[in-house]
Amino acid sequence: MTIKEYPQQQLAAQPIGYWTRAAADLVIGGLRTALAEEQLTQPHWWTLNHIAATPDHWTREALTGKLAPFDDQDTDFEALYADLTARGWLTEADDHLTLTEAGEAGRLRAHDRNAKVHAAMREGIDDAAYAATINTLRRLVANLGGNGDLP
């Protein structure tokens, strides 16, 4: 893919809101489409990853508290946990959540699908340019009173 080059002065005059919205819509849309192939939503994905990273650590209440601030889909997390349990992907013992083998297999399939979206997004963008973009966006967020720390 070829993209037209523009002078720095012209790029610096571009509206950041337009470009961040366009990028966010395409990235999130691509990820949601990939996850939908596994009948998953982004909150499913976040849940699977958090539980996989620290098995037997998360309670429903704690994980919901961690993930809900990122949710823009009005997710019913209790229904989400019930869905993952009904699939045989999630178990709960002593109020702590753990993925089953089937849950980990599903998470890995979803990861592979998401990796294709990330690869397409990062095509032609090296790590230094990507990191510089993230740092610029972090600064913009902080400048506007938001939290510029990494999530």
Image: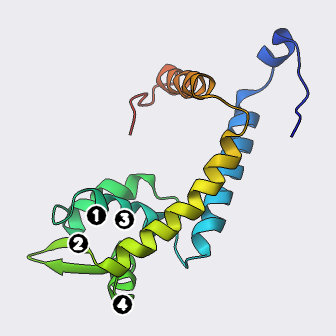
Nearer to us in this view, 92 or 140 = 92
Assess disc 4: are there few (<14), some (14-19) or many (≥20) residues with their C-alpha within 10 Å of its C-alpha: few
Find the distance from the CA under tag 3 to the CA under tag 1. 6 Å
Q: Type of residue at label 3? A: Thr
Assess disc 3: are there few (<14), some (14-19) or many (≥20) residues with their C-alpha within 10 Å of its C-alpha: many
Query: Which disc is residue 86 wearing?
Result: 4
As helix, strand or loop, the secondary structure at mark 2 comes to strand
Find the distance from the CA under tag 4 to the CA under tag 2. 14 Å
Q: Type of residue at label 1? A: Ile
According to the image, label 1 marks what residue? 51
Query: Which disc is residue 143 wearing?
Result: none
Quadrant of the image for the C terminus?
top left
As helix, strand or loop, the secondary structure at mark 3 comes to helix
Query: Is tag 3's residue or tag 4's residue first in the polypeptide sequence?
Result: 3
Q: Residue 21: x, y in percent? A: 70, 42
Q: Residue 45: x, y in percent? A: 45, 64
According to the image, label 3 marks what residue? 47
Q: Residue at x 81, y 11 (%)?
A: 8
According to the image, label 2 marks what residue? 98
Query: Is tag 1's residue or tag 2's residue first in the polypeptide sequence?
Result: 1
Q: Residue at x 77, y 15 (%)?
A: 12
Q: Is residue 63 visible?
A: yes
Q: Type of residue at label 2? A: Thr
Answer left or right for 127 relative to 24: left
Q: Residue 91: x, y in percent? A: 23, 81
For the residues labelled 3 and 4, say whether their Cβ atoms are less than 8 Å apart. Answer: no
The furthest residue to the bottom: 86
For the residues labelled 1 and 2, say whether their Cβ atoms are less than 8 Å apart. Answer: yes
